[in-house]
Image (cartoon, grey):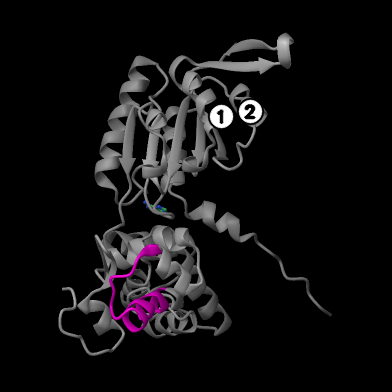
Amino acid sequence: MDKKPKIKEDLTIDSLLRPVGWDDYIGQGKTKQNLKIILEAAKKRQEACDHLLFYGQAGLGKTTLAHLVSRELGGDIKITSGPALEKMADLAAVLTNLGQGDILFIDEAHRLNKTIEEVLYPAMEARKLHLMVGKGPAARMLTLDLPPFTLIAATTRADLLSGPLRSRFGATFKLDYYEPADIEVIIQRSAKLLNLKITSEAVKIIAAASRFTPRVANRLLKRVRDYVEVNAIKEIDAAAAKETMELLEIDNLGLEPHDRRLLEVIVKKFNGGPVGLNTLAAALNDERGNVEEVYEPYLMRLGLIARTSSGRMATKLAYKHLGMDIPEGALL
Ligand code: ADE
């Protein structure tokens, strides 16, 4: 008889792996240190904490930090995003649902539209919600008082936030890529939470492929976990980790096929560059935003490409990684 498999939602794994206290939150030392002071002071004064802006690459823990802040302050967290707040009514519904000391978390804040932004200003500064009710000559401005709350905005592109919005945050924190040693600790911690046996070599292999990013590290660990489960391997070892990375086409630097293709296009099609962003995106048949926000930051962090005033260039390291001869004049 067929047994129905028990499905445990993978999402619950993600929430299981999410740090619940400062001690579990690895890395980002400076941010943690400064945030702790801000929170402690707000609690001492029994005031709502200043509005906070977190920016940095996807997967570096902006949402996780917002959860930690809300836990620390003892309020609820209401989560929304720039694109979800399309109309005034969307924002009004969110704001009027806030309780005292709650956190309003707005992800992808660079995608907030102008009208919504302008309603946010008085909400942030004076805890007032100004609503236009009715139309034409009968239109009236209705003002509602909001409880003390903290807005936490997160974005991958702080440069795209308007100046007036940016200036209304009491503190801004840039989340950086993690140190490989910190990623290793995160993998060890996650493996423990998932009851996995793993060798330190396997941890290193997964960490090296993790793009200095906790979310990627946890995702790869889950894929290796699947691999050993299917192959009835008791302990995650170097061979299992390597084999999984190979199956996923992730190389020893954590590059995926699209990353390697980007390097190859610069090297082969544009002679190593310089090539402009739009031209590069067109040659890759991809979005400019993807190239700029997803692929490039990591390739630059690894030193495989460099940005010059006339465009992107492949470095010597890129040629080396692709197994090609390094031409004269290639960038260091
Ligand atoms: N998961 C996401 N970010 C993390 C961090 N900084 N430490 C531990 N686990 C994480």
Q: Nearer the viewer, mark 2 or mark 1?
A: 1
Q: What residue is disc 1 on? A: 115
Q: What residue do we see at 60% from left, 11% from top?
A: 143
**Start and end of the magenta stretch?**
259-277
Q: What residue type is labelled 2?
A: Met
Q: Is residue 190 visible?
A: no
Q: Is the magenta stretch mostly helix, strand or loop?
A: helix
Residue 300 lies, in percent from the top left, at: 29, 65
Q: Is residue 176 left or right of residue 259?
A: left
Q: What residue do we see at 37% from left, 81% from top?
A: 269
Q: What residue do we see at 31% from left, 77% from top?
A: 201
**Residue 98 drawn in magenta:** no
Mark 2 vs mark 1, CA separation in Å: 8 Å
For the C terminus, which image quadrant? bottom left
Mark 2: give few (<14), some (14-19) or many (20+) Cα within 10 Å: some
Viewer-nearest residue: 246 or 261: 261
Residue 114 lies, in percent from the top left, at: 52, 32
Viewer-nearest residue: 300 or 283: 283
For the N terminus, which image quadrant? bottom right
